[in-house]
Image: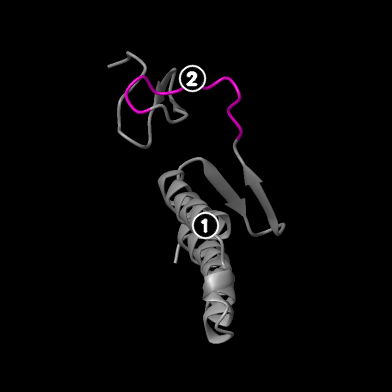
Amino acid sequence: MDRFSFFFAFYGLILGLAVAELLGGFAGIVRAHALKKLEAQTALVALLTFVLICATWVDTFTMDRAITLNFGATKVSFQAQADAPSCAECGSIMVRNGSCYKCLNCGSTSGCS
């Protein structure tokens, strides 16, 4: 198992536990027969939270090249590229690819060949 696979498995576990907690709370409301007391705003916040958790998981999977891990010193660091432009095609933040930038989401480049 390479470093990213280990990190992604651990991160997926944490996000999975968050989803389980969210669904467990909803199940508690159903078991208490309090579903009628659940207002639309609460249901929408729960749905938004679920979507954000899933989006975070997908974003982590697509950013596999921007994450560096050093297990020798038990230190995890993320390569921050504050000067990286956003992709003209999809809007994601691009990563450095030599002297140019490449989008990890859609594969487009910043004009280099």
Judging by the rendered image, the residue that carries numbered circle 2 is 85
Count of marks overlaid on the render: 2
Between discs 2 and 1, the one toward the N terminus: 1
Looking at the rendered structure, the secondary structure element under dot 2 is loop
80 horizontally vs 43: left or right? right
Does 108 sit above or below residue 47? Answer: above
Residue with the most extreme front position: 36
- Against 8, residue 102 (above or below) is above
Q: Most extreme residue toward the top, as rendered?
A: 111
State the residue in front, 28 or 107: 28
Quadrant in which the C terminus appears: top left
Residue 85 in the image: above or below residue 94: above
Numbered disc 1: secondary structure: helix
Residue 108: x and y, percent? 30, 26
Residue at the far left in the pictured view:
113
Relative image position of residue 50 (x, y in whole percent): 49, 59
Residue 43 shown in magenta? no
Q: Amino acid at mark 1?
A: Ala
Give the position of the N terminus as an image quadrant.
bottom left
Q: Name the residue tied to disc 1.
A: 40
- Residue 89 in magenta stretch: yes
Image position of 88 with respect to 45: above or below = above
Q: Identify which residue is drawn at 35% across, 28% down.
A: 90
> Which stretch appears magenta?
80-90
The residue nearer to you, when weighing 83 against 36, is 36
- Colouring style: one colour
Q: CA distance from mark 2 to mark 1?
A: 38 Å
In which image quadrant can residue 74 be found?
bottom right
**Rendering coords of residue 15 (x, y %):** 54, 64
